[in-house]
Amino acid sequence: MKKVFAFLSIVAIFNFGIPVTVVAQDAAAKTEQVAAKSSTPAVTTDSTQKTEETQATAPAEEGGMHKGLKQKFIEGGPGWMAPIALCLIVGLALCIERIIFLSLSATNTKKLLTNIDDAWNKGGVNAAMEVCRDTRGPVASIFYQGLSRYDEGVDVVEKTVSSYGGVQLGLLEKNLSWITLFIALSPSLGFLGTVVGMIQAFDKIQQVGDISATIVASGIKVALLTTVFGLIVAMILQVFFNYILSMVESMTNDMEDASISLLDIIVKHSK
């Protein structure tokens, strides 16, 4: 979780740091021009022209990458860009929800197993169940279900732990199918916009009866922009999806290892 936020912070610094640097450089250039103007009146006209050129080019430089992307997004047209933006918003919302859920579900299994063993030595299986009840996370829930069947034998406990582990795994993987849907849907919408844009470009050629770059440029531009933004959305969601999968795999391995250790504790106290 901390690595993700660190990565996003670095991206934000690079995106928003460039315009600030450009503005600072422009301000320094303007200061030097004003100083030169006051010290050398003979070149007033040249300094004024340079200052006007700097002011004319400043708005184009102050935008930065995010402003350029925003402009291109608007040029792509709301009819095709709005569904792609919706895929990004909903997909990111699902990814953030999964990351928060998985982060809160993480458990220090070694400490939990130690507490269960100590509580069992002091108060029996009921005390061990109380430790599981007071601990948050899927691992503690699996342990509680297994210890509740302790009177029925170790084999029943093992089957219970295995069955309830599958239930908890399903809860960990909840909504992942929807994230994959938006990963596949966003570039598909972009490709659809590309096809429609090319059809519009050929329709204009047919109507005019002449192949001219000015006639077909708008349709081709919309076609390419929808594809670009669809692919960008898919790549962003794919990064988050892979990170979530790595968290689920790590927690699954931890659950399986901890379940084996729990059975060892049960066998030890059954003797």
Image: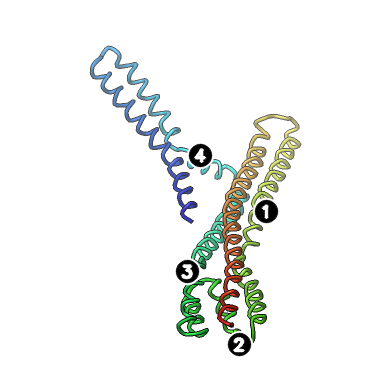
Residue 111: numbered disc? 3
* Relative to 126, residue 256 above or below: above
Quarter that holds the C terminus: bottom right
Give the quarter of the image for residue 56. top left
Q: Distance between the residues labelled 3 and 2?
A: 25 Å
Give the quarter of the image for residue 218. top right
Residue 245: percent from the left, percent from the top?
61, 58
Tag 1 secondary structure: helix
Which residue is denoted by mark 1 in the rendering?
A: 184
| Circles 4, 2 touching at the beta carbon (< 8 Å) | no
Which residue is denoted by mark 2 in the rendering?
A: 151
Which circle's residue, 4 or 3, is located before the other in the chain? Answer: 4
Q: Distance between the residues labelled 3 and 1?
A: 41 Å
User: Which color scheme did the rendering employ for the protein?
Assistant: rainbow
Disc 3 versus disc 1: nearer the observer:
3
Disc 1 versus disc 2: nearer the observer:
2
**Amino acid type of disc 3?**
Lys
Between 265 and 61, the residue placed more toward the observer is 265
Which circle's residue, 3 or 2, is located before the other in the chain? Answer: 3
Between 87 and 133, the residue placed more toward the observer is 133
Disc 4 versus disc 3: nearer the observer:
3
Which residue is denoted by mark 4 in the rendering?
A: 68
